[in-house]
Image (spheres, coloured by chain):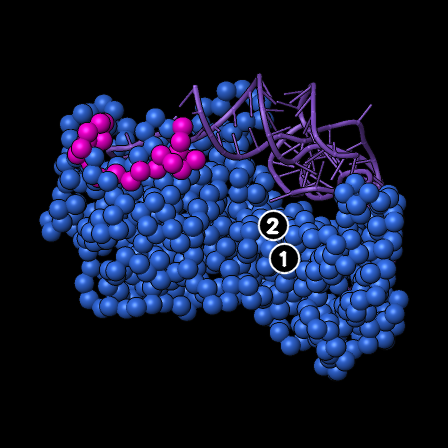
Chain colours: A blue, B purple
RNA sequence: GCGCCCGUAGCUCAGUGGAUAGAGCACCAGACUCCGGAUCUGGGUGCGGGGGUUCGAUUCCCUCCGGGCGCACCA
């Protein structure tokens, strides 16, 4: 960093700025920053960075692309640009930039020496608080792999945002008063089912939920019971409501245990029952009436209702009835109404707050708080500048209604900062569906089969984790006969966390994740354990360096050779890109992009490892490579931490 | 009916206007008595079809085909 006025990760921004200035000075042309493209060329002979700008501007400037390229090259050459050493031109009209790899290496070494586990953090989010709501599983049965996608994505998003400088508060909303819990209560009361002696409560409820839903089809009186139970739950202060609360609490405990083992933690549980009891909606209703945008319909199909008018929102224009009912003609509030109240609370503009209590101490040492209906006031929760709701894409319409309703009701700022992180659902591959006993049409390998909580079709999150642990533990035992079974199991668990989380995080969120046991259980190739293995290999090398030599190598002073190899260079660049990758993934809400970066980083190291002996290299080279391995190990550790994957010195 | 998403190699996926479209899995063949083979190297006439915009399209627009999802005074 010394001597350089900016960090390497800002290089792109700086170069774009210079190019922009060049266009202005040379041709009196004003381009927006977004219109200036900078990319990594496909071939090494085209430099380390390049821009096709001359091609694009040839027409408008009425000059040959190569002439423009030449002038831009000259303009760049006349500038003081650290990290760059040369600028060239390639037909049909590219400007190619060449990195000063020594300067870059120095800068990376220095930065890592100073920042250590903070290397890769950036400051874009500084001073901004973001509330991320994820998990949100109905507290009535075991979590399945669809919920796992939600929690893993949400957790990685939280980690990314934190490393991008945001203050992050993770909330887990518990719908303890809905039909889902009521169904279990019906099962317990009417069907008199009880868990077997050693049966997990969430697994027991998984089957019970299926059974109850099956019985609804045959027995109309049971459906009556469900309505009665729902009424009693809403009323409160009766044995049925107590039972419902007890079911919800016990299931939440199961869910938390499932998530904790994957390194997923929360700051606050918010309970639907508290929102109801504290009258969040009543409060919001008064607030919205005051603002004057709520409409009481006197006629038409919504006569007698309070509605929000969404007809002039493009997204809803083609709907037969774009208005959203918030209060029914019978005076009760709709789900959307409660959601609006809750969302306003997250932004701290509801004018009403929960009471709070400690819920428990989580295994990572942080306190999990819970909302309550009475007790202690605290003024630290909510009050966010940005709210991200991690919910699957089937709820897109509802989330759009929520966002536009806020805007139309006079909370424009809050509406615009309400983000639906919508991901596609998890479905089952034909092979996995077959394995679970789901009727599969033919022998084909294409296609997917939907999971269904009501029908009991799905892979339980813990079943998946257990199977991966078993597989990983076997592998560890094979490789390390000298270790104890306990050590095998411990490593197997950490590797399983890596495998499961990476599998849940690596895919683009707008694609349905077609879950397949064979793929999820794979520990080779583009998987979490591959990333972990790269880290372990680095740790192994450092462990074999002579102690005195190791202590003598200082990242800040180690000399950087002038003849850096292709593999060394690729690794250095990959390490240098961590801050930019973090920023990009955090700002674009793209955990999968970060997963891909991490895979690239690991691959760069693997290639370096295969081609570049460290311990047996000549002394100067050895010292440089040790420094490089140290840097990689730190960068990889930070990338793994961002993905919530354990970094293992041995595996 | 209206709207949204997806369609890239046998399979699972990267690639949000640029140079020869990339990975993993599966399959075949290889890797020095070298720091760990959970690794690496090699093996491939693939962007659903058709129009358009552009110097340039897997990427943007239109249309068709195929697959998924959503459009409550339900939660």
The answer to whether the residue labelled 2 contacts the one labelled 1, judged by CB atoms less than 8 Å apart, is: yes
Residues at marks 2 and 1, CA–CA distance in whole angstroms: 8 Å
Residue A304: in magenta span: yes
Q: Nearer the viewer, residue A587 or A369?
A: A587
On the image, numbered disc 1 is attached to which residue? A581
Measured as percent of width and height from the top left, residue A483 is found at 59, 63
Measured as percent of width and height from the top left, residue A63 is found at 84, 45
Mark 2 neighbour class, 10 Å CA radius: few under 14, some 14 to 19, many 20 or more: many
- Dot 2 or dot 1: first in sequence order is 1
On the image, numbered disc 2 is attached to which residue? A593
Q: Nearer the viewer, residue A477 or A423?
A: A423
Residue A578: in magenta span: no
Q: Magenta residues: mostly which secondary structure?
A: loop
Measured as percent of width and height from the top left, residue A270 is found at 30, 55
Which residue does the image show at 73% across and 60% down from the upper left? A21
Q: Nearer the viewer, residue A278 or A383?
A: A383
**Is A382 on the left-hand or right-hand side of A233?**
right
Q: Which residues are magenta?
A: A298-318
Tag 2's secondary structure? helix
Measured as percent of width and height from the top left, residue A469 is found at 52, 51
Q: Is residue A117 visible?
A: yes
């Amino acid at each position: 960093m010394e001597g350089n006025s900016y960090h390497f990760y800002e290089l792109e921004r700086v170069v774009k700025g210079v190019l922009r200035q060049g266009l202005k000075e040379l041709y009196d042309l004003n381009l927006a920053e977004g219109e200036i493209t900078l990319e990594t060329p496909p071939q090494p002979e085209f430099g380390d960075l390049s821009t096709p700008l001359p091609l694009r501007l040839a027409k408008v400037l009425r000059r040959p692309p190569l002439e423009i390229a030449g002038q831009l090259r000259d303009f760049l050459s006349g500038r003081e640009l650290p990290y760059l050493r040369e600028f060239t031109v390639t037909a049909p009209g590219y400007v190619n930039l060449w990195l000063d790899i020594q300067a870059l290496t120095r800068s990376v070494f220095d930065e890592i020496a100073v920042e250590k586990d903070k290397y890769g953090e950036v400051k874009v989010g500084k001073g901004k608080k973001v509330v991320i709501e994820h998990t949100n599983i109905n507290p009535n049965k075991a979590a399945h792999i669809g919920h796992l996608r939600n929690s893993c994505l949400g957790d990685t998003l939280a980690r990314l945002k934190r490393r991008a400088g945001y203050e992050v508060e993770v909330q887990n909303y518990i719908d303890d008063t809905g039909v889902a819990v009521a169904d279990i209560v019906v099962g317990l009361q009417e069907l008199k089912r009880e868990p077997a002696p050693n049966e997990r409560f969430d697994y027991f409820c998984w089957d019970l939920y299926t059974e109850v839903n099956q019985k609804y089809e045959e027995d109309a009186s049971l459906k009556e019971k469900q309505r009665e139970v729902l009424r009693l739950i809403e009323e409160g202060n009766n044995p049925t409501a107590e039972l419902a609360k007890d079911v919800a609490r016990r299931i939440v405990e199961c869910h938390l245990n499932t998530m904790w083992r994957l390194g997923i933690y929360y700051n606050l549980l918010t309970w639907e029952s508290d929102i109801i009891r504290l009258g969040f909606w009543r409060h919001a209703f008064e607030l919205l009436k005051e603002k004057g945008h709520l409409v009481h319909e006197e006629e038409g199909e919504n006569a007698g209702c309070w509605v929000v008018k969404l007809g002039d929102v493009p997204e809803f224009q083609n709907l037969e009835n774009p208005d959203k009912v918030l209060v029914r003609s019978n005076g009760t509030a709709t789900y959307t109404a409660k959601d609006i109240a809750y969302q306003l609370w997250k932004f701290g503009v509801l004018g009403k707050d929960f009471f709070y209590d400690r819920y428990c101490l989580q295994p990572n040492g942080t306190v999990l708080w819970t909302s309550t209906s009475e007790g202690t006031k605290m003024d630290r929760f909510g009050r966010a500048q940005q709210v991200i709701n991690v919910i699957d894409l089937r709820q897109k319409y509802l989330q759009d209604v929520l966002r536009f309703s806020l805007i139309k009701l006079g909370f424009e700022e809050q509406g615009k900062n309400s983000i639906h992180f919508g991901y596609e659902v998890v479905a089952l591959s034909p092979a996995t569906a077959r394995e679970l006993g789901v009727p599969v049409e033919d022998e084909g390998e294409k296609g997917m089969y939907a999971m269904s909580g009501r029908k009991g079709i799905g892979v339980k999150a813990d079943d998946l984790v257990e199977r991966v642990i078993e597989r990983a533990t076997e592998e560890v035992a094979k490789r390390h006969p000298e270790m104890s079974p306990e050590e095998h199991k411990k490593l197997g668990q950490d590797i399983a966390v890596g495998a499961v989380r990476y599998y849940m995080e690596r895919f683009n969120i707008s694609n349905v994740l077609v879950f397949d046991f064979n793929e999820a259980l794979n520990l080779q190739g583009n998987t979490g354990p591959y990333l972990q293995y790269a880290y372990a290999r680095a740790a192994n090398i450092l462990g074999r360096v002579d102690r005195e030599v190791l202590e003598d190598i200082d990242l800040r002073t180690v000399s950087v050779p002038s003849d850096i190899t292709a593999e060394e260079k690729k690794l250095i660049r990959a390490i240098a890109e961590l801050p930019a990758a973090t920023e990009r993934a955090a700002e674009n809400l793209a955990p999968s992009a970060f997963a891909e970066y991490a895979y690239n980083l690991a691959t760069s190291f693997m290639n370096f490892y295969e081609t570049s002996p460290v311990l047996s290299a000549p002394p100067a080279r050895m010292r440089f490579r040790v420094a490089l391995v140290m840097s990689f190990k730190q960068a990889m550790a930070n990338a793994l931490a961002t993905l919530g994957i354990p970094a293992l010195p041995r595996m």
